[in-house]
Image: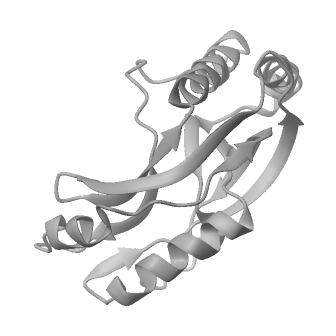
């Protein structure tokens, strides 16, 4: 199964961001669905069934070693001409530690992970269709400041890729497991 570790913003943060994004939505971008908005901590890819028990145990320990922390959605940017995103602010050191712990938990459980690179917290809002510049969208949301919330859980999310072949169909995400932060 295709998995990733994530922080899920609460409904209030999603609703605030959705209100800010709504005036920008057009058919020039492939917008992500609000129900799937998340901050990926570690992308695990395809995970074999036989490593799940160990992965769960290690992610539980990673969560238990991390104290709850404050976070808010903040600002906007883009990765080249590919993806438009909103960033995060608050206790980014704690968020990065949680991301590193989730990555290490997956590696130690035997999940083959991509080469580790510096964690850039972001929530993907949309992807560019061919030839569409993202700068105007990023500029419109550059000053975005969401309300702070307390991150209290680490989530393991299953990503179900589209299979219907219908244009514009989005992946579906479902929470496979979660663990409370402890610290």
Q: Quadrant where the N terminus lies? A: top right
Q: Residue 142 at x, y = what percent? A: 29, 61
Q: Quadrant where the C terminus lies? A: top right
Q: Which residue does the image show at 57% across and 31% down from the upper left?
A: 91
Q: Is residue 165 visible?
A: no
Q: Is residue 93 above or below residue 24?
A: above
Q: Count all numbered tags in the image, as a single digit.
A: 0
Q: Residue 58 at x, y = what percent? A: 81, 17
Q: Quadrant of residue 65?
A: top right
Q: Is residue 21 above or below residue 58?
A: below
Q: Residue 102 at x, y = what percent? A: 66, 24
Query: Is residue 67 left or right of 149 when viewed as pictured?
Result: right
Q: Which one is nearer the viewer's eye here, 174 or 18? A: 18
Query: Is residue 113 left or right of 110 when viewed as pictured?
Result: left
Q: Quadrant of residue 135?
A: bottom left
Query: Is residue 8 left or right of 180 when viewed as pictured?
Result: left
Q: Quadrant of residue 59?
A: top right
Q: Is residue 172 above or below residue 18?
A: above
Q: Residue 110 at x, y = what percent? A: 68, 15
Q: Is residue 162 above or below residue 65?
A: below
Q: Which one is nearer the viewer's eye here, 116 or 114? A: 116
Q: Which residue does the image show at 81% across and 33% down from the upper left?
A: 49
Q: Which residue does the image show at 57% across and 66% down from the upper left?
A: 171
């Amino acid at each position: 199964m295709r998995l990733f570790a994530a922080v899920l913003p609460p409904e209030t943060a999603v609703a605030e961001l959705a209100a800010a994004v709504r005036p920008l939505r057009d058919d020039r971008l492939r917008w992500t669905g609000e129900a799937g908005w998340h901050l990926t901590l570690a992308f695990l890819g395809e995970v074999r069934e036989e490593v799940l028990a160990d992965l769960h145990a290690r992610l539980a320990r990673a969560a238990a070693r991390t104290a709850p922390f404050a976070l808010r959605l903040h600002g906007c940017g883009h990765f080249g001409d590919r993806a438009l995103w909103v960033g995060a602010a608050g206790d980014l050191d704690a968020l990065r530690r949680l991301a590193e712990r989730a990555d290490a938990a997956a590696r130690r459980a035997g999940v083959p992970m991509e080469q580790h690179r510096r964690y850039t917290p972001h929530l993907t809002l949309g992807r560019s269709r061919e030839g569409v510049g993202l700068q105007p969208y990023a500029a419109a949301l550059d000053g975005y400041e969401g309300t702070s919330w307390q991150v209290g859980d680490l989530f393991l999310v299953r990503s179900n890729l589209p299979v219907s072949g219908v244009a514009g169909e989005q992946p579906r995400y479902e929470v496979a497991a979660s663990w409370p932060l402890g610290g």
